[in-house]
Image (cartoon, rainbow, N blue to C red):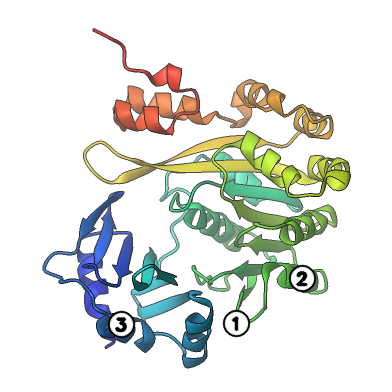
């Protein structure tokens, strides 16, 4: 048993999602969205920190971390507990954050996600994006969509992740899961070779640069179903982010390619729930003629109108979801206000 496993056991016992270790500070966990100290634990000195982190890291990757002061990988404590690890340097030494990865992949029904996500998972080609800030549950939602494909269709699915989080069993589909830093040097390199691997579905763990985004668009244009994530919190910002990553002289072509390939955007936020726990809220934009024309003509301001007009198809605005949750008292007025795009809609009324 690794020395750090004792901290993981305490973290799991209190239902926390993340464990934070910073040299010179006591261990902290994120419990229902709030940071709290792990009870009974003293500040961690340099020797203890190195002892915790080095023991569970491959020797060559530890050397890599010491050189770059940044490292991502997955740690499997046992058959019931798996964590996404990020090691990093800071002003007072070294630190790490560990995110719990559920060993059981939850279904779309388990997560109470909108049924339209099954339609997106059933597509044969195009680009589907799940977006949101760090810690919003993007990976969990994507895993559920991939699991739906695995349960219903015989597809060859390639995932390119940093690190591999959810390990999918081969059921109806066949999986190849590649980890950036271990199996492939970068997301872009993984996508370069994917076109020669006869893929039906490609999951790109993070679309964060020009090379990755342009290759993902190209793969979708060639008839592959591509899933990806971005750190944006609305459909409009997602489209802007994709176009803006291209040089100005290529943005016209990028708009055309995105207009032809985009099948849906699921923007997700994770909200503090009244009474404890958290709940996901999703803004959903689906592809169609109106969306394609708006992207091609750079009329991004029309996206909200498309979503409002597509409610019968399963589209929804984030603020409408927040208003619904607030009306059912699932979230507080403060939480709705903080996460809303149109703040005026959620200003508390004076009595």
The image quarter containing residue 148 is bottom right
Tell me the residue that label 1 is attached to: 182
Can residue 86 be seen? no
- Badges 2 and 3: C-beta atoms under 8 Å apart? no
Residue at x-position 37% and y-position 29% = 336
Q: Quadrant of the C terminus?
A: top left
Residue 233's label in the rendered image is none
* Residue that sits furthest to the top in the current view: 351
Tell me the residue that label 2 is attached to: 194
Q: CA distance from mark 2 to mark 3?
A: 37 Å
The answer to which of marks 2 and 3 sits earlier in the sequence is 3
The answer to which of marks 1 and 2 sits earlier in the sequence is 1
Residue at x-position 80% and y-position 39% = 259
The answer to which of marks 3 and 1 sits earlier in the sequence is 3
Q: Is residue 7 above or below residue 279?
A: below
* Residue that sits furthest to the front in the current view: 91
Residue 298 position within the rendered picture, expressed as x and y whole percent measured from the top left: 79, 31
Kindly state the secondary structure of the residue where label 1 is placed: loop
Q: Nearer the viewer, mark 2 or mark 3?
A: 3
- Badges 1 and 2: C-beta atoms under 8 Å apart? no
Tell me the residue that label 3 is attached to: 52
Q: Which of the pair 88/258 is nearer the observer?
A: 88
Residue 48 falls left or right of residue 173: left
Q: Which of the pair 85/63 is nearer the observer?
A: 63
Q: Which of the pair 330/35 is nearer the observer?
A: 35
Residue 248 position within the rendered picture, expressed as x and y whole percent measured from the top left: 83, 44
């Amino acid at each position: 048993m690794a020395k750090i496993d004792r901290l993981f056991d305490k973290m799991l016992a209190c239902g926390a999602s993340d464990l934070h270790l910073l040299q010179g500070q006591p261990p902290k966990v994120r419990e229902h969205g709030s940071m709290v100290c792990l009870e009974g634990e003293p500040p961690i000195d340099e020797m203890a920190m190195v002892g915790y982190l080095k023991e569970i890291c491959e020797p060559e990757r530890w050397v890599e971390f010491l050189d770059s002061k940044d490292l991502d990988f997955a740690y499997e404590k046992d058959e019931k507990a798996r964590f996404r690890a990020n090691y990093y340097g800071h002003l007072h030494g070294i630190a790490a954050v560990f995110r719990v990865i559920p060993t059981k992949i939850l279904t779309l029904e388990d997560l109470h996600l909108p049924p339209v996500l099954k339609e997106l998972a059933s597509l044969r080609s195009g680009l589907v994006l799940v977006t949101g800030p760090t810690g919003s549950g993007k990976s969990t939602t994507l895993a559920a969509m991939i699991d739906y494909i695995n349960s219903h269709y015989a597809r060859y699915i390639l995932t390119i992740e940093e690190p591999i989080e959810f390990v999918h069993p081969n059921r109806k589909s066949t999986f190849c899961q590649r980890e950036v830093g271990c199996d492939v040097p970068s997301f872009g390199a993984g996508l370069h070779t994917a076109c020669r691997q006869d893929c039906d579905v490609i999951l790109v763990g993070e679309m964060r640069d020009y090379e990755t985004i342009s290759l993902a668009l190209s793969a979708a244009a060639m008839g592959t179903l591509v899933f990806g994530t971005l750190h944006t919190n609305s459909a409009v910002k997602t489209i802007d982010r994709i176009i803006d990553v291209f040089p100005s002289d290529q943005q016209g072509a990028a708009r055309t390619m995105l207009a032809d390939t985009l099948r849906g955007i699921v923007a997700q936020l994770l909200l503090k729930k009244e009474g404890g726990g958290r709940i996901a809220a999703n803004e959903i934009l689906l592809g169609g003629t109106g969306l394609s024309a708006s992207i091609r003509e750079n009329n991004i301001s029309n996206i909200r109108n498309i979503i409002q007009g597509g409610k019968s198809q399963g589209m929804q605005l984030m603020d409408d979801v927040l208003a619904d949750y607030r009306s059912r008292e699932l979230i507080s007025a403060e939480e709705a206000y903080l996460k809303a795009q149109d703040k005026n809609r959620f200003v508390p009324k004076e009595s």
